[in-house]
Image (tube, grey):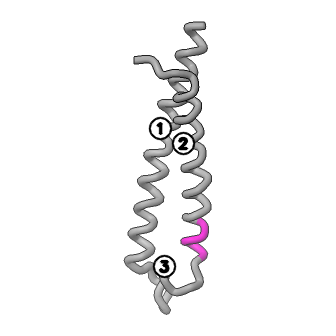
Amino acid sequence: MKLSRPLSWFLLAFGVWSWVIWITFARNLWGDGSGLAFDDAGDPTAYFWVHLTLAVVSFVLGTVIGVIGLRGLRALRRTT
């Protein structure tokens, strides 16, 4: 299966975008001072674990999607 050039670029951009957004989110989650992510004793709360899981899954999916886009671009370059 061949991906078109615009679709390959979109998938690669989506992968990069996912990393930028979720790294920022994870950094903000870790430094949360509102009391949502960590309780008074400094232990992580359920909110922290759920959102950390979302971030990790998004990192993995963003990486996979970005790699698919990169492979699509490489395949197009070899055929032209």
44, above or below 76, in the image = below
Q: Position of residue 74 (x, y in %)?
A: 57, 19
User: What is the three-letter code of the residue carrying label 3?
Assistant: Ala
Closer to viewer: mark 2 or mark 3: 2
Write down the quadrant of residue 32 in the picture. bottom right
Kindly identify which residue carries mark 2.
15
Write down the quadrant of residue 30 in the picture. bottom right
Q: Determine if the magenta segment contains residue 52.
A: no
Dot 2: what SS? helix
User: What is the three-letter code of the residue carrying label 1?
Assistant: Ile
Which quarter shows the N terminus?
top left
Tell me what residue is drawn at x 46 percent, y 87 percent: 39
Q: Position of residue 53 (x, y in %)?
A: 40, 62
Say the numbered circle drawn on residue 65.
Answer: 1
Say the numbered circle drawn on residue 37.
Answer: 3
Question: On the picture, is 33 further left or further right than 2?
Answer: right
Question: On the picture, is 12 further left or further right than 46?
Answer: right
Front residue of 41 and 5: 5
Q: CA distance from mark 2 to mark 3?
A: 26 Å
